[in-house]
Every structure is written in C-alpha cells, then in structure tokens.
Amino acid sequence: MPRWLHRILRMGSIGTGAVFLMSAAVNCVAIDRLFDASVANQLGISKAEMRWLYYGFAVIGVFFATVGAFVPLPKIKPSAKSGRRPKSP
C-alpha cells in the first residue's frame, strides 16, 4: 500500500472521529441552552432523550479516532504484474 494512501486512511479516520466528537459536544451544549418545551413539542423528543443520542455520537467519535490512531493497516505487497517498468541502472 502506498505510503500516502496509508496516511490518508489513518488521518481520515482520526478526522472523522474528531468531527463526530466535536459535533456531539457542541450539540450537547446547544440543547442545554436552546431546548425548551416548544422545541420538544415540535420534535417529539425530550431533552434527556436527545442528550443520549449525542452521547452515542461522542462514543462513535472516540471509537473512530482510537481506531485510526492505534490499529495498524495491513501491509499489501504489490503484485508482480504491475503496470510499472523496472528502473534501469
């Protein structure tokens, strides 16, 4: 696997996890500040129920970031019939 692809996969996973985690944190703060009875009526879900949804997003974010940071990607050897020519000396 090319080195650049390895880095893109790893950093993409960490970035996705960070986005999930920050989104969950911002939304948990936002529902505490902005959520009232009229919003609960319109959505059909209470503040306490919605908070657990964002806790779930935070757990998913931590999982993605942890997997991206610590789980090694498999090493794939290039096949003998690649389209590249061998370098001449």
Image (tube, rainbow, N blue to C red):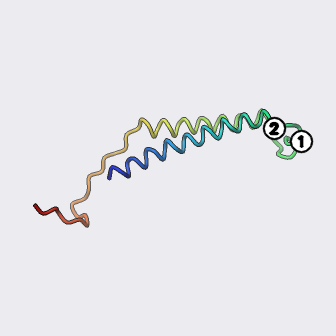
| Residue 39 spot, x, y in % from top left | 85, 42
For the residue marked with disc 1, what is the amino acid?
Ser
Residue marked by disc 2: 34
| Residue 7 spot, x, y in % from top left | 39, 47
**Quadrant of the rendered image containing residue 41:** top right
> In the image, is residue 77 above or below residue 81?
above
Residue at 71%, 39% (x, y): give it: 27
Say few, some or many: other residues with alpha carbon within 10 Å of mark 2 (under 14 / 14 to 19 / 20 or more): few
Q: Is residue 16 left or right of residue 45?
A: left
For the residue marked with disc 2, what is the amino acid?
Leu
Cα separation, mark 1 vs mark 2, equals 10 Å
Which disc number belongs to residue 38? 1
Residue at 49%, 41% (x, y): give it: 14
Say few, some or many: other residues with alpha carbon within 10 Å of mark 1 (under 14 / 14 to 19 / 20 or more): few
Q: Is residue 18 left or right of residue 89?
A: right
Q: Is residue 65 left or right of residue 39?
A: left
